[in-house]
Image (tube, grey):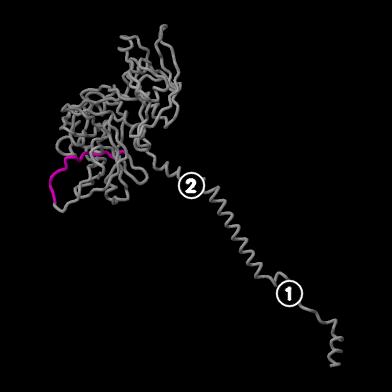
Amino acid sequence: MGTNEEDKEKYNLYTEKIVLHPAKKYRWLIQIGKALLFMASVAVAAIIFMVFLYPVVQKKMEERNKEKDVVYIQKDNYILAEGETGEDKDKLTEQDLKENYEQAMATLRAKVEDVKKCLVTVDIEQPTTQIPTVEKSETEVTGLVVAHNYSRYLILTSERLLSGGSRFVVKLGEDTQIEATAVCKDEVTGIGILSINELGLTKEQKDALSVAVLDNSYKVRQGDLVIAAGKIYETSKGIDYGTIAGIRTEYSKDNGYEVFETSITVTAGGFGILFNSDGKVVGISKASADSTMKFIGISDLKAPIETMINSQGIMYCGITGQNVTDELATKYGLPSGVYISAVDIDSPAYYAGLQAGDVINRINGESILTIQQFSEKLYQCADGDTMYVTAKRQGKDGYSDVLFSVNVQLKQL
């Protein structure tokens, strides 16, 4: 015992007590704390992202997808100046169509295959049956592929078809059909829009489809040779050739349409597409009691078609007007512009103060001479936009300018 105590005293200076560093002693606690702090940081970052950043990112993605899903159609300018017929309308097309009728017809026939690629057959969906039938559908008509956007094909067809059913199909050949969705229809112009999803098509079917080229119908002249395709006779796949027999203007709500009268005959209930000698679309058939086909110029339909596709409606101001021609100006002493013959009750034009007898000559400070130019300005607006209309109103001292603020509307169809 004595020896042990002596040894302790002897080696006391050479011994030390080992004490663990706190960082090592509580290593597991520190690691847990770091993990919890990291998780808390991630949670805070996630909350900040979801609350502040995600809505912004989502909005941008929605806007980008929306932009992808918007259809744009190139518009044409309608200019009617005193004593001016238009340089393009004075030119002979395709060297006066080869200066030979037979050669001209050969030129037209060569375009038929291109024409067919942008045409489909559209019908009301019929109930399925186990009994095969060879009877032709009484309701099927022609459809025109006017756009391919994102994942869908947009097809222009007859408004009467869309009014006659609720479920529709597009036929791509004798044995293939795909379900179609109604987008919009307009009784005034007689056109409707359907869409089909490209995911339901094979590569071969997509390759066989072509989007139609919508040409400038303001360049069409009387005497031009044209192709009409569609439900012309007893079939929805009819093709015929003819000439432009006459051109006139018809006035409608907020717009005016060039109407082409042709030499092509049609059976009752017909619906067709008019192509020029280049195989480009210049007209959509107009319902008529006559046996000869009449077509609305495609240039006057481009803006309505675009709005029908993108917004399921048409722009609305509420006037019925007509162009003040030289003859009308001389006969009635009218100033140049668009003469308002009627204003709809409870329309944007009505609430703005426009009246029958006013002559519109400026929109948003820019001069206009025709109802077509008025419509062009209208379709540059969105729902609820203000359009500043300057019109000449007759008083006891003659005509004076009056400015109107018109809050235009998108009229759902």
> Where residue 20 is drawn, which disc sits there?
1
Q: Secondary structure at mark 1?
A: loop
- Above or below residue 160? Residue 355 is above
Percent of width and height locating residue 328: 31, 12
Identify the residue at horizontal 41%, vertical 6% (top origin): 396
**Residue at x 29% of width, y 42% of height:** 210
Q: Which mark is residue 8?
A: none
Quadrant assignment, res 251:
top left
Residue 208 vertical position relative to residue 375 in the rendered view, above or below? below
Q: CA distance from mark 2 to mark 1?
A: 53 Å
Q: Quick check: 393 left or right of 182?
A: right
Residue 146, position as x, y percentages in the image: 31, 38
- Whether residue 20 appears in magenta in the rendering, the answer is no
Q: Secondary structure at mark 2?
A: helix
Q: Which mark is residue 58?
A: 2
Q: Amino acid at mark 2?
A: Gln
Residue range in magenta is 132-146
Which SS type dominates the magenta stretch?
Answer: loop
**Dot placed on the residue nearer the N-terminal end, 2 or 1:** 1
Q: Quadrant of residue 219?
A: top left
Residue 40 picture location, percent across and down:
60, 59
State the residue lying farthest toward the top: 397
Residue farthest along the left direction in this orientation: 134
